[in-house]
Amino acid sequence: MAKNEGLAKILAIIGGIVIVVEGVLGILGNTMTKFFSLGFLDALAPLVWGIIAIVIGLLILISTGVLGSKKAKLGFNGVVILVLGILGFLFGSNIGGILVIVAAILMFL
C-alpha cells in the first residue's frame, strides 16, 4: 500500500457517501445541487439525476471495498477513482465529487 492510499481511500469513502446522500435528497427534491433541465421532462429531472448520482456513489463505494458485489468488480486505482470522481462531480454532489477527485490525485502521488 502506498503512503497516501489510506487517506485516499478515506476521502473516496466519504465522497461516495456524500454523493449517495445527495442523490437521495435529489430524488426527494431537497438537494443543494441544481440539476440540469431535461426540457420537456422537467418533473422527472430530479428523479433521473438522483438515480444517476446514487449509481455513481455506489460504484465508488464498491471500488473502495466498502460494499461488496459479485457482478461489479472495480479496482481501487487512480484512473477509476478519477473518472468516477468527475462523473460524481457532474451528476451528483459537487463536494463529494471534489473529495473523490482529491483522493484520485493522492493516489497518483
Image (cartoon, rainbow, N blue to C red):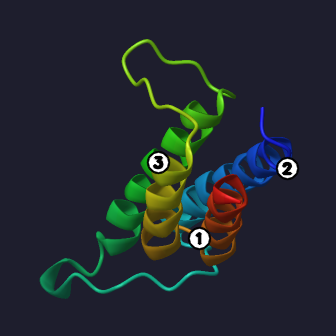
Residue 18 image point, x, y percent = 70, 58
Residue 54 appears in the picture as rendered = no
Name which residue type carries label 2: Leu
Residue bearing the label numbered 1 = 93
Residue 96 appears in the picture as rendered = yes
Residue bearing the label numbered 3 = 80
Numbered tag placed on residue 7 in the rendering: 2
Q: Nearer the viewer, residue 105 or 36?
A: 105
Q: Mark 1, residues whose alpha carbon is within 10 Å: few (<14), some, or many (≥20)?
A: many
Which type of secondary structure does the marked residue at label 3 adopt? helix
Q: Are marks 2 and 3 in contact (CB under 8 Å)?
A: no
Q: Against 106, is 60 above or below?
A: above
Residue 84 image point, x, y percent = 47, 55
Sequence order check: which comes first, mark 2 or mark 3? 2
Q: Quadrant of the N terminus?
A: top right
Res 40 → quadrant: bottom left
How much space separates mark 1 and mark 2, taking CA atoms?
Answer: 20 Å
Q: Against 21, is 72 above or below?
A: above
Residue displayed at 43% across by 65% down:
87
Q: Against 38, is 57 above or below?
A: above
Residue displayed at 32% across by 62% down:
48
Name which residue type carries label 1: Ser
Q: Mark 2, residues whose alpha carbon is within 10 Å: few (<14), some, or many (≥20)?
A: some
Residue displayed at 69% across by 28% down:
66
Query: Nearer the viewer's eye, disc 1 or disc 2?
Result: 2
Residue displayed at 56% across by 32% down:
62
